[in-house]
Image (tube, rainbow, N blue to C red):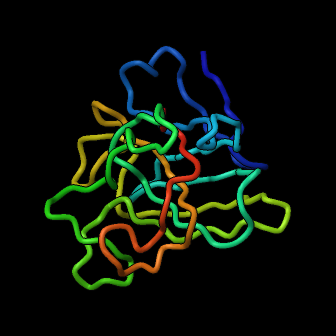
Amino acid sequence: MSTIRKLTAGFFVTTLAASLAVSPALAAGGALKGSDGSAKGNITVTAAPKGVVLRIEASGLTPGWHGVHFHEKGDCSDPKFTSAGGHVHGVTPVVHGLLNAEANDSGDLPNIHVGADGKATVELYSTLVLLNTGGALPGLLDADGSALVIHANPDDYKTQPIGGAGDRVACAVIR
């Protein structure tokens, strides 16, 4: 018996329902919520051969550029989303920044742009993490899970520790 889950128009992933508990996940996702607890959209993270594809469908955000990062804990329980911990990383000390030659921060992602209507739909590819554990890169679905956090400001890709991205304004637990 198999199930088919539609991820995007024209793209399907087929999994054996009976083997989901013992096989690595092909996709994970979660509901994106604001600091006031309101619904802000959804995310889907799909395993790729050398990383993950992240799809964000968000609304109700401030127009403009926003930093986005994978965070180390699957916990968005407090209003400031500090329960999600720091960025996903494989080594310490962590050096942030996609434009930093010394960077080793696996949670780094490109900024997203939110339109004047407060909406953003984007797909990003990251080769810095894997969906599942057991590889050379950090796995998002490790023992304590992970989260996707959207910040108030854009990431400058250099400044420590989060690129000047500011407050955490939306969060989704990756399940």
Relative side of 155 to 4, left or right: left
- Return the residue nearer the eye: 73 or 127: 73
Would you place residue 46 above or below residue 17 in this image?
below
Q: Residue at x 38, y 27 (%)?
A: 23
Q: Residue at x 56, y 69 (%)?
A: 153
Extreme residue in the left direction: 92
Relative side of 151 to 96, left or right: right
Q: Residue at x 79, y 67 (%)?
A: 115
Percent position of residue 114, x then y = 72, 66
- Return the residue nearer the eye: 15 or 51: 51
Relative side of 151 to 56, left or right: left
Percent position of residue 96, x then y = 31, 71
The number of callouts visible is: 0
Locate the N terminus by quadrant: top right
- Return the residue nearer the eye: 96 or 101: 96
Q: Residue at x 46, y 66 (%)?
A: 109
Give the quarter of the image for residue 37. top right
Percent position of residue 132, x then y = 35, 40
Would you place residue 158 above or below residue 32 in this image?
below
Percent position of residue 162, x then y = 38, 67
Would you place residue 78 above or below residue 122 in this image?
above
